[in-house]
Amino acid sequence: MKNILKRKIGIAGCGTMGLPMLKVLLKNKISATGYDIKPKENFKSIKNNFVESKLSFFDQNEIIISLVRDINETIEICEGKNGLFYFKKPKFLIISSTLSPLFIKSLKKKSPRNITLIDAPMSGAPMSAKRASLTFMIGSTKVQFKNILPLLKLMGKKIKHIGSFGEGMSVKVLNNFVASCSVVAVRNVLSKAKSFGIKPKQLLDVLKDSSGQTWFANNLENIDWSKENYDSKNTIGILEKDIKSFLDAINETSPNNKAMKNFQNSLIEGLKGIPSYPTN
């Protein structure tokens, strides 16, 4: 692949992560457009760089970064009507959604030869997408990694080549399992702080300088979804999907690990019952 920054780039899924990533590319004078299942009127800030037709979107872009929500939406953009897999031109699909490693491996087996799949999930929340400071975990050949690196550097500060296809996603679901544990733990202790006569801010200040520190607690005031309650459609709800992706990966390597399955189920219940963020 010649200079990737001269190619036409498409962002499929202009949600809380995809939209700021698209804006970063446009700010850097990259020829980039976005596509989403939501209509164009929802994306007035990028109206001149938004393509409503999936057919036109895939036709005009050579590099597709997929940031759609889940497996079903990934199947739709790949195998649905006017899906990417029906195009005969060479295309590159960079999968940055957090999905089951087993699923993306099965997707690769079904993909036509002209479609090159690379897994490149990222971490950092919307605040990092806006600041172009994401962390990417790449599963690809070394040559593919070298080719896409200039593009990823525009959106992220830490680009890590993990290994072959699927291994980037494996690291991501492991990471998100840990992150989900910290979300449930931090929100629960914050809700209990008052009963100990401790203000939430006091607790957070101590956590930042103690063994209980986590990325979630350290960045809580900057994470736009940190104070949400559970809803299947919000980011707390997305964490449930990520936990299930982790379990899917665990089932491949340790199918009889009942303890982990029980822990996973308890964690999902913890997300669903996450206490409201204290007001003071």
Image: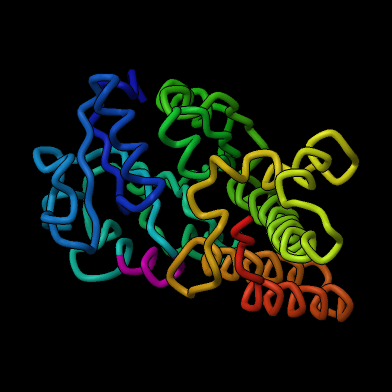
Is 64 in front, or is 189?
189
Q: Is residue 242 left or right of residue 211?
A: left
User: Magenta span has 145?
Assistant: no
Q: Residue at x 77, y 78 (%)?
A: 266
What stretch of residues is rendered in magenta? Answer: 70-76
Q: Quadrant of the N terminus?
A: top left
Q: Residue furthest front?
A: 197
Q: Residue at x 31, y 68 (%)?
A: 76
Is 240 in front, or is 29?
240
Q: Is residue 129 left or right of residue 275?
A: left
Residue 226: where, in percent of width, then height? 57, 54
Residue 15: where, in percent of width, then height? 34, 53
Is 232 in front, or is 118?
232
Q: Is residue 34 left or right of residue 112?
A: left
Is 251 in front, or is 155?
155
> Which quarter of the figure has residue 187?
bottom right
> Which quarter of the figure has residue 264?
bottom right
Q: Residue at x 75, y 51 (%)?
A: 199
Depicted 172 relative to depicted 235: above or below: above
> Which quarter of the figure has residue 163?
top right
Residue 207: where, in percent of width, then height? 81, 42
Depicted 35 relative to depicted 5: above or below: below
Q: Is residue 18 left or right of residue 187?
A: left
Depicted 30 relative to depicted 15: above or below: above
Q: Is residue 154 visible?
A: yes
Residue 3: where, in percent of width, then height? 33, 18
Query: Overall secondary structure of the magenta stretch?
Result: helix
